[in-house]
């Protein structure tokens, strides 16, 4: 019925996330293998990290994203196994790691490396990788829906609200509300990897110092990934709607999960992430009614939040900057959680009297500067220590 709609996922950002996640798997496989343990167990890390990387940066996991992630996982697992053996060989016979890496097929064919052990280790890696990847794919395609199914307010003993008693704030994803922040994150996290690859490709036989500098640059990308975790959380939430009810309480509504229990659009909410701007006017009206019913059902149950709507009771702002509010809230009696709310919801003010959000978050130049500095420091440190 809704043929014109497209998936809410960002395919390019998701592919980058899968690549960054697979790099974590490569590092894990090589490190564990060099420590003398069975590196194949690290294949679990490869499968989970790559798929979760796609899901986090891409805003969801579709069938197309799953296929691309699996293909990338298979390729990167092969490279990781080859690199693990190349590092071991380089340490044993004092040759360059990348020379051993490039000559791996010849070394196996000539019997200098036992073919059964080499290919057997690769098969084990693939088995453990699929053990980690398959549940992640299934969970991602099902939308990871948890909790009780929602019931209409009529079934809870209340009249269904018509949606006129609350405000809905939604980020303008199509208009690029978070595009600048997303771009700054991707550039910052990829910078170290790109510089490292350039260093490895300069010259036919890279010296050990150049190799160490390249690895230092790649490592800086992982450090930036950890530093950018609050912004990753923002990109998970920018497609969720914020609702302010008549009593002033804020709620967070996940349209994807809400659509599974109270259909208001023909788009398959179990596969693609929904957001307000993708809905047609008549679907927005139906979604508004569904949100009202879900909130009424939650209140009827005593205030315990559901999978689709979360009540941000006793919301307190812990920290604020140009990009987000970090807040604490009470989702249910006796519980306290933390939430990051991006300043992409035009007109939304968390506290009375404060300036509402403008609807577009700026580029994060500080994160980019940190990436440049960290890449230079880690690359220089690797060069100096080699």
Image (tube, rainbow, N blue to C red):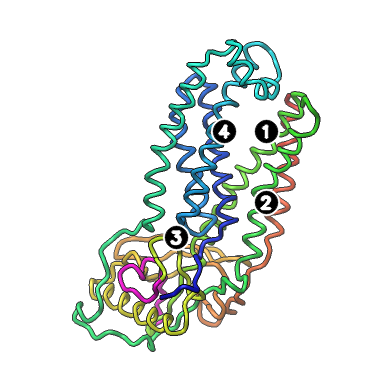
At 41% from the left and 33% from the top, the residue drawn is 128
| Contact flag, marks 3 and 4 (Cβ < 8 Å) | no
Look at 44% across and 75% down and name the residue there: 2
Report the disc number at residue 27: 4
Measured in 3D between alpha carbons, the distance from the residue under mark 4 to the one under mark 2, in whole angstroms, is 19 Å
**Distance of label 3 from label 2 (alpha carbons):** 25 Å
The residue that label 1 is drawn on is 215
Q: Residues within 10 Å of mark 2 (few under 14, many from 20)?
A: many
Image: 46 above or below 254: above
Callout 2: SS: helix
Disc number lying in front (1 or 3) = 1
Is residue 341 rendered magenta in the image? no
- Element at label 1: helix
Q: What number is the disc on residue 188? A: 2
Residue closer to the observer: 31 or 47: 47
**Bounds of the magenta segment:** 248-266
- Residue 338, labelled with which disc? 3
Label located before the other in sequence (3 or 4):
4
Q: Is residue 262 left or right of residue 214?
A: left
**Residue 252 is drawn in which quadrant?**
bottom left
Q: What's the CA distance linking mark 1 and mark 4?
A: 10 Å
Residue 56 location, x and y as percent? Answer: 50, 54
User: In the rendered structure, does residue 261 fall within the stretch colored magenta?
Assistant: yes
Q: CA distance from mark 2 to mark 1?
A: 16 Å
- Asked if the residue under mark 4 is in contact with the one under mark 1, i.e. CB atoms within 8 Å, the reply is no
Compare residues 198 and 67 and report the one nearer the observer: 67
């Amino acid at each position: 019925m809704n043929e014109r709609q497209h998936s809410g996922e960002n395919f390019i950002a998701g592919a980058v996330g899968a690549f960054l996640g697979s790099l974590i798997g490569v590092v894990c496989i090589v490190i564990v293998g060099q420590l003398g343990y069975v590196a194949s167990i690290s294949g679990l890390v490869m499968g989970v990290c790559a798929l979760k990387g796609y899901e986090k940066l891409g805003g969801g996991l579709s069938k197309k994203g799953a296929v691309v992630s699996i293909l990338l996982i298979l390729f990167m697992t092969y490279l990781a196994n080859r690199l693990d053996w190349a590092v071991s060989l380089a340490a044993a016979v004092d040759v360059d790691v990348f020379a051993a890496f490039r000559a791996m097929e010849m070394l196996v064919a000539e019997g200098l490396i036992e073919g059964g052990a080499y290919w057997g280790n690769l098969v084990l890696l693939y088995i453990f990788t699929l053990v980690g990847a398959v549940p992640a794919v299934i969970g991602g395609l099902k939308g990871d829906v948890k909790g009780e199914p929602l019931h209409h307010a009529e079934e809870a003993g209340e009249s269904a609200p018509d949606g006129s008693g609350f405000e809905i704030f939604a980020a303008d994803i199509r208009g690029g509300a978070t595009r600048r922040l997303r771009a700054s994150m991707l550039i910052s996290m990829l910078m170290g990897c790109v510089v490292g690859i350039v260093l490895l490709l300069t010259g036919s036989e890279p010296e050990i110092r150049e190799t160490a500098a390249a690895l230092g640059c790649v490592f800086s990308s992982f450090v930036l990934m950890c530093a950018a975790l609050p912004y990753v959380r923002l990109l998970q939430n920018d497609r969720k709607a914020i609702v302010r009810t008549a009593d002033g309480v804020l709620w967070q509504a996940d349209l994807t999960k809400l659509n599974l229990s109270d259909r208001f659009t023909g788009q398959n909410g179990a596969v693609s992430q929904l957001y307000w701007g993708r809905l047609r006017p008549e679907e927005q009206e139906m979604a508004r009614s569904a949100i009202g019913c879900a909130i009424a059902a939650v209140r009827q149950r005593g205030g315990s939040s559901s999978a689709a709507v979360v009540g941000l009771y006793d919301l307190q702002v812990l920290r604020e900057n140009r990009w987000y509010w970090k807040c604490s809230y009470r989702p249910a009696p006796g519980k306290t959680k933390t939430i990051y709310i991006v300043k992409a919801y035009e007109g939304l003010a968390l506290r009375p009297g404060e300036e509402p959000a403008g609807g577009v978050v700026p580029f994060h130049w500080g994160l980019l500067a940190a990436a440049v500095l960290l890449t230079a420091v880690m690359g220089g440190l690797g060069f100096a220590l080699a």
